[in-house]
Amino acid sequence: MSGAPKILIVDDSMMVRMTVKRTLLSVDFEVVEAKDGVEGLAKAQASTFDLILTDLNMPNMDGLTMIQNVRQLPAYTETPIVMLTTESGDDKKAIGHESGVSAWLVKPFEPDHLIEVVGSMLF
Amino acid sequence: MDEELLAEFLTESNENLDSIEEQLLDLETDPSNSDTVDSIFRVIHTVKGSCGFLGLKGLEKVAHAGENLLGKIRSTKFKAGGDMISLLLESTDMIKKLIAGIEETGSEPTIDATDLCTRLAAAERLIEGGSVAGASDTGAADDKVVTMDWLVGIEDGDRNLLQQAGLSTQAQVLEAGFEKLRAIEGIKPAVALKVLGIAKASSITASEGKTKAEQPKPVDNKIEAEVIAVAVVEKTETKQDKKESLPAATEQKTRKPKAEGSIRVDVSLLDELMNQVGELVLSRNRLLRLVEDSTDTELVRTSRGVSQITSRLQEKLLHTRMQPISTLWSAVPRLLRDITKNLGKKIQVEMEGQETELDRTILAALKDPMTHIIRNSCDHGIESPDVRRVNGKSEEGVISLHARQESGFIVIDINDNGGGIDHQKIRAKALKMDVITSEQAATMSDKAALQLIFHAGLSTAETVSNLSGRGVGMDVVRSQIEGVGGTVEIESEVGKGTVLHIRIPLTLAIIPAMIVVNADQHFAIPQMMVQELIAIDPSSESWEEVAGKPFYKLRGSLLPIISLTEVLKQHGDRKEILSIVVINIGERQIGIGVDDILGAEEIVVKPLGRHFKHLDVYGGCSILGYGGADSRLYGHYQGLASGAGCGVNCVRA
């Protein structure tokens, strides 16, 4: 059985990664972590994910740059990508959409909120 | 509050905050460096983000205000000046304080940070360049349904609800989608998502065979659910592992970034281990002594094996307690910044040998004296920019810190290129305060006169300002350094600057020592102090007497000799001195006259019991491998030297 939804969480904060991972493991999803854009991109290339959650501000490669790169990959043209961030300015969101962000999830978020967003993006 | 998460948060935050001070100071010197701003912003941002999860309202408020200001600095490319940096430093201090409070009590301390937040907000407005600050609101996700694929292991109740809603096949569930599923009354969003996830997973296999309507298999829910959960976790991990081995360059350990190569151990556990190894070393020494004359080769060989393993164990354990001195020095730039701001002086700090490692107990003990010395250097050493200019020096003073390892010792030099200390003034002051006699004042070397600064009698605030020297609590500095077996010496040249040399042993607990015998008692002298051993002929003509004190003429120069018998007022036949142990005290040498020298041995130093604390001739006690279990004392050289009237300060081992 290999079809459980597979999620990539990219965030430099272990706290955030743990929270996301716990929440999604509780619904039997498969979760892979990456701690910055570079690692996120590499993991996205090495496997296929159903959804990517990513932070905006990260060392080495920020979330937007990573998304732009991920969108170039044939397997990820349609994949939902959710931006996890504390920034919610409209201008930022506009740039985000251009780069291929499917949704924004403003931190801090409740696990239930994450489930809502992931659910509505995936199904 | 979730304790595991909280602990994770505290560790993460402390690690991140460690570097932030340094980065803020970097930013002050190079305000246009956007990388530094980014990096600082990220740390505060992460703290703030995590606070939200943990419900730490007060901390979140401060972090949020700090983040907003930093965000503003970043977006407007504002060049943060001294005041702005001070404010940011203040806010990181507050964050650290709150985190320390949480660490101690497990809950948020009640510290009012309203004023700070107001000032942060005011600073933000000050920079205000047009764009509106991102007020936090909840950005709802854009609706977009991506269809995917079915379910096992869901509670009966939930399953019934699904059935009632007409969703009994994976295809139906998937078709309904998340929105519809979660709209079913009684179904939690998490369950809805889980159902969908399973629907998706099983439909891959199902769709290959028959897609037709089939009741979801009535599985024995709970156990199955767990099995699946475990399976998923395992899968995630193995896959990750595999991937990690592929593109090795960019991929780093994902899971538990810290935990891979290291774990955190309670310091008290390390101390206990150290104690036990100390005991083991003692037993080892005894064992070696016992088998010394044995003819049983097997026994001898085994003892040697035990001995080697003990040594290795000891060495490794000592290593676990070592930390680089940079952990201590990292606070210095901030300290200097605060002091110089207040004093209106310009001071730069240079460091060398930050990677030098020291026992953590020693490091902790050095914190206060180091701070004190640096404060004094700024306060009394480095002159104000005007004075420096007049004296033909650059306006900016320099304090340099050097650390290096030198045969079992760590040597730390703290150097300033300030005004220096006039030994004549110290001499005069010491005389006035009755610390020395006029005879001593006249004969004392300049260097020795300078060392008087460490004397308690001279260490009053008033003395200091009058002396234009340092000395506020220099006696405290000395006693703290001696407390960890170190020595401190001062050198100074008027107009040029001052250097403090601190020498401290690498570790405290187990030291190699020279064992000597005097009046049939054993004493240990720390090997690190021992310069050389001399066997002498009592009738030698090398003895001289100066001012009633014995000296031995060694290679042309006079070596002051202290007799252990006299110092310790030992009874027994007063024998002539037969051996001399030449020891280094700071940069001086003195000879200790003893009856016999037995040799070197590693000893475990134990502090003296309360009843013997007043015996300042001794530095501690130890059990020696030589026969019986009587406790032996070994010299405390400050007491020893001053007891003999030599006026030599410092050194205890």
Image (spheres, coloured by chain):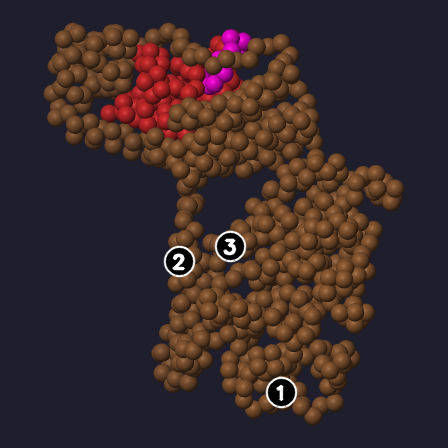
Chain colours: A red, B brown
The percent position of residue B68, horizontal first and vertical second, equals 55, 19
Q: Spatial distance from mark 1 to mark 2, Cα to Cα?
A: 41 Å
Q: With respect to residue B623, does B489 lie above or below?
A: above
Quarter of the image for residue B156 reads top left
Quarter of the image for residue B594 reads bottom right
Q: How many marks?
A: 3
Looking at the image, which is closer to me, B504 or A32?
A: B504
Res. B517 visible in picture: yes
The amino acid beneath tag 3 is Thr
Q: Spatial distance from mark 2 to mark 3, Cα to Cα?
A: 14 Å
> SS of the residue at dot 2?
helix
From the image, tell me which residue sits under label 3: B361
The amino acid beneath tag 2 is Glu
The percent position of residue B41, horizontal first and vertical second, equals 56, 25
The amino acid beneath tag 1 is Leu
Report the chain holding disc 2.
B
The percent position of residue B9, horizontal first and vertical second, equals 42, 33
Q: Tell me if A103 is positioned left or right of B188 in this view.
A: right
From the image, tell me which residue sits under label 1: B578
Residue at image point 43% right, 24% down? B57
Q: Is residue B631 magenta?
A: no
Report the chain holding disc 3.
B
Contact flag, marks 3 and 1 (Cβ < 8 Å): no
- List the single residue furthest toward the bottom: B539
From the image, tell me which residue sits under label 2: B272
The range drawn in magenta is A83-92
- Disc 2 crowd, CA 10 A, few/some/many (<14, 14-19, 20+): few
Q: With respect to residue B209, does B344 lie above or below?
A: below
> SS of the residue at dot 1?
loop
